Amino acid sequence: MSKDMDKSQLETQKRLGQVETDVKLISHDIKNIRDNHLSHMQKDIDKIDLRLWAILFMIVALAITNVLATWLS
């Protein structure tokens, strides 16, 4: 019975070690994403935002030009 307990404890320690390793890897990946990838994604989002504002401005300018052309004709 003692051998079964020793095997069980060894298996539990192995599993615990594997879980600790997995947690460290996941923690490292999360830190890498947070520190690196999010800043690049934010820059891309800012570029898209600027382009959308430019397109909106052009649409409004075109609409105003059409209204003024119709009004002055």
Image: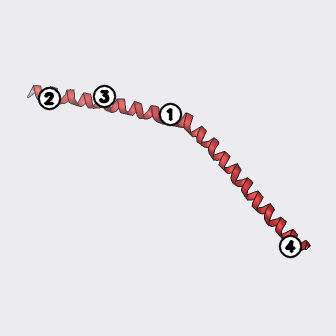
Spatial CA span between label 3 and label 4 = 77 Å
Name the residue furthest front.
73
Q: First in sequence: mark 4 or mark 1? A: 1
- Say the numbered circle drawn on residue 5: 2
Q: Which residue is mark 1?
A: 31
SS category of the residue bearing label 4: helix
Circle 1 residues within 10 Å: few <14, some 14–19, many ≥20: few
- Residue 70: which numbered mark, if any? 4
- What amino acid does circle 1 point to? Lys
> Residue at left 78%, top 62%?
60
Q: Mark 1–mark 3 contact, CB under 8 Å?
A: no
Residue at the spot of label 3:
17
Q: Secondary structure at mark 3?
A: helix
In the figure, is residue 65 to the left or right of 52? right
Q: Which sits earlier in the primary sequence, circle 2 or circle 4?
A: 2
34 on left or right of 1: right
Residue 26: where, in percent of width, then height? 42, 35
Disc 2/disc 1 C-alpha distance (Å): 39 Å
